[in-house]
């Protein structure tokens, strides 16, 4: 039994944030109907690597969905939308501010049409506040949510993270909100509006930095490798510091390429064993009791020297060799995994996190798998839909339209773009 079998979602979202959410719900068994305008989701054509085929940007975010194309600028298209709305448990959108309102479908109108429907909405900055009408983008959300100011090296420029915390992170937040609202709907019979702002989602993911922001009003941050002092205000950028109570950093290993690094956390409990292992190789057999590093307070004060010693030891080992040395000592560590590392990793393949799929236009390709493992309902990951591939199927199966009605709607332009005017 699929966890969300019987839940139907009308997915009007596009690009990344919304489709991330609806794809996860589809993998859990929901029937996700991707509701596209006749031109389709813009990412179908973005960054194409196979001519005339849907891009990887689109295919990797829209698996297990059905696609229907509807022209909402026609009266007939709007009626198809209304009919589908009445048949769905959830409706999702991530349009710019006011787009659905201008089409005549405010939340109040949608709720009136289907009082049980849950509506999920992703906005850059929410529907209230002075930023409400601003346009957002992945990196804009990272900039305004606190991530960029705390990412990077001291005295250097702020950096965005490679993880899509603005888009995909917001989609994950929305999935949680939709499932909660659906659970409440099943108790009360009443749907509700669920909104997640990208900026808000990024702030939630930066919670630890806001912890440190408040600590700075009372003390310096002793675990940081860069100087901090009480009352300094903003949390500084601190490179690869662990951000927790234990010291951590990325250590460069041989052959010293761009990804030949191992991230190492030196917990208080492991220092003696670690020092006894690396000390002799460094010509420092008494490293474990060296007063610069013997206690955690000492290691915090002198952590740059400590990392220099560990790096000197690491210079003789690859990241995998160093991990093999440190794991028996219970030192938390992990190699910096490149995309190539992950795409060929036995652990990743074994957990079905790199899944091969077949597509009628682009052929074989890979998608990142389902990260949420449900013991009684493992997902069957299916390819993304072609544009409008399931239009007739949805009209017949979900709405009960017959061939005559479908033909009349097609003739009226309900599913296609209007013809271009002659120049």
Image (cartoon, rainbow, N blue to C red):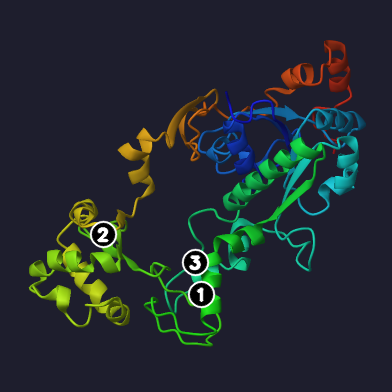
x then y, percent, for residue 207: 55, 65
What residue is drawn where x is 60% and y is 35%?
62
What residue is drawn where x is 22% and y is 82%?
292
Which quadrant would residue 341 be assigned to in this image? top left
Q: Is residue 319 left or right of residue 377?
A: left
Question: From the viewer's perspective, is residue 338 above or below residue 396?
Answer: below
Q: Which mark is residue 313?
A: none
The foreground one among 405 and 114 is 114
The residue carrying mark 1 is 212
Question: From the viewer's perspective, is residue 37 above or below residue 323?
Answer: above
* Distance between mark 3 and mark 1 Cα atoms: 19 Å
x then y, percent, for residue 92: 73, 41
In terms of sequence position, does the residue under pointer 3 or pointer 2 come before the other? 3
Q: Which mark is residue 331?
A: 2
Q: Is residue 215 left or right of residue 252?
A: right
x then y, percent, for residue 269: 26, 66
> Does residue 224 appear in this view?
yes
């Amino acid at each position: 039994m699929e966890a969300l079998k019987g839940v139907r979602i009308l997915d009007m979202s596009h690009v990344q944030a919304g489709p991330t959410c609806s794809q996860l719900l589809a993998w859990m068994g929901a029937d996700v109907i991707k509701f596209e305008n006749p031109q389709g989701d813009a990412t179908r054509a973005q960054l194409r690597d196979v001519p005339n085929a849907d891009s990887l940007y689109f295919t990797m975010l829209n698996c297990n969905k059905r696609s229907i194309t509807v022209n909402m600028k026609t009266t007939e298209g709007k009626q198809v939308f209304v009919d589908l709305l009445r048949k769905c448990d959830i409706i999702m959108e991530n349009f710019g501010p006011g787009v659905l309102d201008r089409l005549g479908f405010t939340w109040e109108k949608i709720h009136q049409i289907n009082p049980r429907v849950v509506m999920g909405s992703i906005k850059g900055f929410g529907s209230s506040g002075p930023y409400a009408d601003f346009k957002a983008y992945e990196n804009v959300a990272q900039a305004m949510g606190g991530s960029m100011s705390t990412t990077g090296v001291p005295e250097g420029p702020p950096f965005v993270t490679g993880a899509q915390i603005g888009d995909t992170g917001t989609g994950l937040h929305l999935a949680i909100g939709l499932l909660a609202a659906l659970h409440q709907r099943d108790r009360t019979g009443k749907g509700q509006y669920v909104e997640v702002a990208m900026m808000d989602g990024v702030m939630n993911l930066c919670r630890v930095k806001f912890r440190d922001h408040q600590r700075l009003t009372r003390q310096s941050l002793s675990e940081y490798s860069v100087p901090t002092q009480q009352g300094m205000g903003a949390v500084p950028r601190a490179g690869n510091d662990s951000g927790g109570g234990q010291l951590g950093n990325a250590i460069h290993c041989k052959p010293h390429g761009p990804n030949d690094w191992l991230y190492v956390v030196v917990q208080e409990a492991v220092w003696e064993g670690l020092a006894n292992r690396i000390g002799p190789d460094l010509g420092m057999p008494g490293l474990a009791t060296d007063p610069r590093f013997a206690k955690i307070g000492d290691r915090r004060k002198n952590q740059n020297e400590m990392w220099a010693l560990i790096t000197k030891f690491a210079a003789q080992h690859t990241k995998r060799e160093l991990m093999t040395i440190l794991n028996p000592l219970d030192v938390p560590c992990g190699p910096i995994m490149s995309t190539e590392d992950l795409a060929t990793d036995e652990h990743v393949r074994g957990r079905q996190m790199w899944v091969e799929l077949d597509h009628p236009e682009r052929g074989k390709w890979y998608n990142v798998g389902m990260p949420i493992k449900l013991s009684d309902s493992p997902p069957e990951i299916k390819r993304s839909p072609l544009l409008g591939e399931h239009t007739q199927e949805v009209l017949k199966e979900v709405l009960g339209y017959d061939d005559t009605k479908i033909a009349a709607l097609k003739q009226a332009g309900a599913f296609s773009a209007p013809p271009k005017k002659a120049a």
